[in-house]
């Protein structure tokens, strides 16, 4: 469980930095793109349960933002190559 918390915290913090404009999306994509997407998709149900149990919709909000931005970027790049 410690490992999950560390991974979650890392991606959540990267998402906050991205949202605040303190890190460039190109850099984030180059470093963690696939990992962030796959990890969010695996852990999303855990975060949804945590949000309900704690009545806190902000749990993993940075991570969710990171995921959304990475998916948008992925779709934009796919449409460029199509």
Image: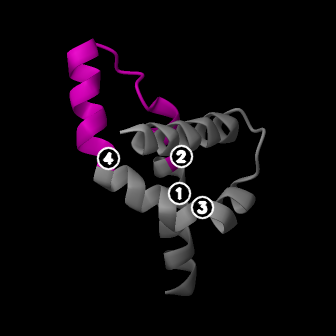
Q: Which residue is mark 3?
A: 32
User: From this viewpoint, is residue 11 visible?
Assistant: yes
Q: Which residue is mark 4?
A: 43
Q: Which residue is mark 1?
A: 70
Mark 4 neighbour class, 10 Å CA radius: few under 14, some 14 to 19, many 20 or more: few
Classify residue 31 by image quadrant.
Answer: bottom right
User: From this viewpoint, is residue 65 visible?
Assistant: no
Residue at left offset 58%, top offset 42%: 10
Mark 3 neighbour class, 10 Å CA radius: few under 14, some 14 to 19, many 20 or more: few
Which labelled disc corresponds to residue 66?
2
Residue 63 part of the magenta-drawn span: yes
Q: Point out residue 82 in the picture as x, y percentages from the top left corner.
A: 49, 87
Mark-to-mark CA distance, 1 and 3: 9 Å
Q: Looking at the rendering, in which quadrant would you find the N terminus? A: top left
Q: Which residues are magenta?
A: 43-66
Disc 2 on helix, strand or loop? helix
């Amino acid at each position: 469980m410690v490992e999950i918390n560390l991974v979650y915290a890392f991606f959540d913090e990267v998402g906050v930095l991205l949202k605040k404009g303190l890190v460039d999306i190109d850099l984030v994509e180059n470093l963690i793109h696939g990992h962030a997407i796959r990890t969010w998709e695996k852990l999303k149900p855990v975060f949804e349960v945590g949000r309900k149990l704690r009545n806190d919709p902000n749990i993993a909000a940075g991570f969710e933002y990171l995921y959304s931005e990475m998916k948008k970027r992925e779709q934009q790049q796919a449409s460029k190559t199509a």
